[in-house]
Amino acid sequence: MNRETAARFEAEFMPRIVEQVTRLLDRGVRVEIVPYENLLLPTRLHASAER
């Protein structure tokens, strides 16, 4: 994925993915977008929660 495609994915699709994930998971879960860095580290979704 090139940088332009990654930027579009981050702007158009990731917010919707984050919204759906937060609806499905408990309120104590934090979800964040980890932006594209390079071909080996594409845009990612990071979810975390306290025990």
Image (spheres, grey):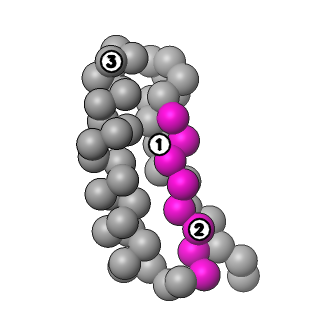
Q: Using a 10 Å C-alpha cutoff, classify the residue at mark 1 as few (fewer than 14 neighbours), some (14 to 19) or many (20 or more).
A: some
Q: Which residues are magenta?
A: 28-35
Separation of marks 3 and 1 at Cα, in angstroms: 16 Å
Residue that carries the numbered disc 3 in the rendered image: 4
Residue 22, relative to residue 37: is it above or below?
Answer: below
Percent of width and height locating residue 29: 57, 74
Residue at point 30%, 57% (across, down): 16
Mark toward the start of the polypeptide (1 vs 2): 2
Residue 30, relative to residue 34: is it above or below?
Answer: below
* Disc 3 secondary structure class: helix
Which of the 4 image quadrants contains residue 19?
A: bottom left
Image quadrant where one finds the C terminus: bottom right
Left or right: 50 in relation to 43: right
Residue type at mark 3: give it. Glu
Percent of width and height locating residue 32: 54, 54
Percent of width and height locating residue 47: 55, 62
Which of the 4 image quadrants contains residue 6?
A: top left
Residue type at mark 2: give it. Arg
Of residues 18 and 46, the one nearer the viewer is 18
Residue 15, relative to residue 35: is it above or below?
Answer: below
The tag on residue 44 is 1
* Disc 2 secondary structure class: strand
Whether label 1 touches label 2, CB < 8 Å:
no
Percent of width and height locating residue 12: 27, 42
Residue that carries the numbered disc 2 in the rendered image: 30
Residue type at mark 1: give it. Arg
